[in-house]
Amino acid sequence: MSSCNNSACLNEARRVAIFGGTHGNEMSGVTLVNLWVKNSAEIQRKGVETKPFITNPKAVEKCTRYVDTDLNRAFTPENLSAPGGDNLPYEVQRAQEINRIFGPKESPDAYDVIFDLHNTTSNMGCTLILESSNDHFNLQMMHYIKKAIAPASCLVLLNEHPLLKYSTSRSVAKHPVGLEVGPQPQGVLRSNIFEAMRVILKHALDFIELFNEGMEFPPCTVEAFRVLERIDYPRDANGNIIAMVHPNLQDCDWEPLNPGDPMFQTFDGKTIHYHGSGTVYPTFINEAAYYEKQQAFVTTRREALVASAIRKV
């Protein structure tokens, strides 16, 4: 990134990928990508090569989240540099292949933008996931999308927590974008969720085309929810869950959780309250896929991120 008369000058985004099936039972992305593999006219834009790609075909075939290990946690330096071979977990082999096609990660040859399409069982609505508060291209894109779909809502989740950030499939790109849309059960396709995801992708690709054509985007502010902490379910000495998400919290993603508010309800009806130091905004509440990760929800803090003006070099 260079500076050009108070604007951040960025290279054109000429190579774009759309990933579906990183988790094989999240059906909106799987279905859209399969649709676009057959006919990509809808996602093509002037001067942009857009490649739809099924990232975890074996998991898609089995309609399961993954086969051996979570592909969306597999793009670590250790995995990507491990000697190849059939003895590696399937998703690690797949991560290496994806890195060869769309990377190498953190190299000049990596794809410019990767959209990774996900569904959640949580009541999160449409959520764009940002991996760096310093990615002004992505901030400007998210600002454009939010304006384009208004009054419909699309929130921004920022995860750059040093202990909670993970090595995503989209992290291969220079500008990684996660798109999480729910609620939708695993293995199920809901038309409203499918269409919401499709509309957001349309506006994201429109933004890239406009940027490449020379449009300058002025400075802007983007409301984001910064990941703070992962909260586990209450457990007994043997690690067994002993409480559920409280009815007052269930389906209340993005709503304020204040000290003293109900958080969990034990199986015998007792309430466990939130005892944090201040108001937080929980999300991924009671996500089905996160039981194995010992996560009931994550807490976030609402903040305003400032994006510099951008234009192409």
Image: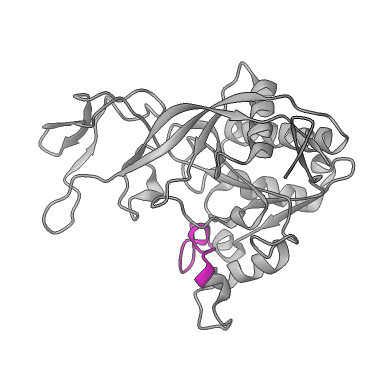
**Image height check: is 159 above or below 79?**
above
Q: Nearer the viewer, residue 204 or 163?
A: 163
In terms of secondary structure, what is the magenta stretch mainly? loop
**71 left or right of 253?**
right
Residue 67 falls within the magenta-colored stretch: yes
* Residue nearest the observer in this picture, 251 or 259: 259
Residue 25 in view here? yes
Q: Position of residue 39 (x, y in %)?
A: 82, 48
Residue 158 vertical placement versus 241 (above, below): above
The spot of residue 76 in percent (x, y) is 51, 65
Residue extent of the magenta highlight: 62-78
Quadrant containing the N terminus in the rendered view: top right
Relative image position of residue 45 (x, y in whole percent): 85, 40
Q: Is residue 64 visible?
A: no
In this picture, residue 276 sits left or right of residue 253 = left
Q: Which sits in the foreground, 133 or 118?
A: 133
> Which image quadrant is residue 98 in?
bottom right
- Could you tell me which quadrant the C terminus lies in? top right
Q: How many marks?
A: 0
91 relative to 244 in the view: left or right:
right
**Per the image, is 142 magenta?**
no
Is 222 placed above or below 235 here? above
> Does residue 269 appear to the left or right of 184 in the view shown?
left
Indicate the position of residue 46 as horizontal and vertical percent values.
Answer: 89, 40
Q: Name, please, the residue furthest toward the top.
A: 151
The residue located at (37%, 39%) in the rendering is: 228
Residue at 54% from the left image edge and 78% from the top image edge? 82
Taking the spot 24% from the left edge, 29% from the top edge, the residue there is 277
Color encoding of the figure: one colour
Tell me where residue 301 sits by quadrant: top left
